[in-house]
Image: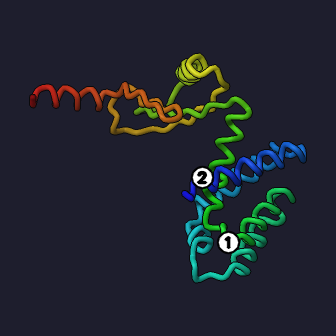
């Protein structure tokens, strides 16, 4: 079975358990914390994915890092996953949980890349565009890329609108070559 399918199943089970225990928002924060920690500490995921490191050691690492920082429900899931020898996919489980949480709460994540930082007015316009298109609450992430020259690249889910000057210049170049 593929990693994403297994991670998705664990995430769905965790979301159901968190709803049942009335700690959904707390577990969401815990998954954000785990994902952030894993992203910033490459060594953590290398240790969890390593077949050389024993499961007791992996469990000890998770306990040392997260036992006091996350809810008992979240830590219980870490413990169960470790006992089932699936700790290598904990980062994928966190990603799938965050996606499922956002879907459950009606939140759409969007990313806009611009050559300069957004003004409040432009930020609101992008949020309104995404909200109107999806009918969901928008969480807008902003990135600055000086290579764009002008325009923007808006990504919502698996859809992308590339209205950058760089892409238009590339299109012109391709037309001139043909």
Q: Residue at x 40, y 39 (%)?
A: 145
- Camera-nearest residue between 155 and 83: 83
Q: Secondary structure at mark 2?
A: helix
Q: Secondary structure at mark 1?
A: loop
Q: Residue at x 9, y 31 (%)?
A: 177
Please provide percent x and percent y for residue 38.
62, 61
Q: Tell me the number on the disc at residue 5.
A: 2
Q: Tell me the number on the disc at residue 100.
A: none
Graded by Cα atoms within 10 Å as few (under 14), some (14 to 19) or many (20 or more), the crowding at tag 1 reads: some
Q: Residue at x 80, y 43 (%)?
A: 25
Answer whether residue 46 is visible to the viewer in this image. yes
Q: Tell me the number on the disc at residue 85.
A: 1
Please provide percent x and percent y for residue 164.
35, 28
Graded by Cα atoms within 10 Å as few (under 14), some (14 to 19) or many (20 or more), the crowding at tag 2 reads: few
Please provide percent x and percent y for residue 111.
52, 34
- Camera-nearest residue between 24 and 154: 24
* Outermost residue toward the front in this view: 1
135 vs 81: above or below: above
108 vs 23: above or below: above
* Outermost residue toward the right in this view: 21
Q: Earlier in the sequence, mark 1 or mark 2?
A: 2
Per the model, the C-alpha gap separating discs 1 and 2 is 16 Å
Please provide percent x and percent y for residue 35.
64, 55
């Amino acid at each position: 079975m593929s990693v994403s399918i297994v991670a998705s199943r664990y995430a769905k089970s965790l979301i159901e358990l968190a709803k049942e225990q009335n700690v959904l928002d707390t577990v969401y924060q815990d998954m954000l914390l785990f994902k952030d920690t894993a992203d910033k500490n490459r060594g953590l995921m290398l240790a969890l994915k390593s077949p050389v490191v024993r499961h007791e050691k992996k469990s000890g690492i998770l306990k040392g890092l997260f036992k006091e920082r996350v809810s008992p429900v979240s830590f219980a899931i870490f413990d169960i996953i470790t006992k089932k020898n699936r700790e290598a996919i904990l980062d994928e489980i966190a990603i799938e949980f965050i996606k499922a949480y956002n879907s459950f709460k009606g939140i759409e994540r969007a990313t806009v890349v611009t050559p300069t930082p957004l003004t409040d007015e432009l930020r609101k316009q992008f949020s309104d565009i995404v909200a109107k298109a999806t009918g969901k609450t928008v969480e807008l992430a902003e990135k600055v890329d000086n290579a764009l020259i002008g325009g923007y690249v808006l990504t919502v889910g698996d859809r992308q609108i590339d209205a950058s000057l760089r892409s238009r210049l590339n299109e012109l170049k391709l037309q001139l070559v043909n």
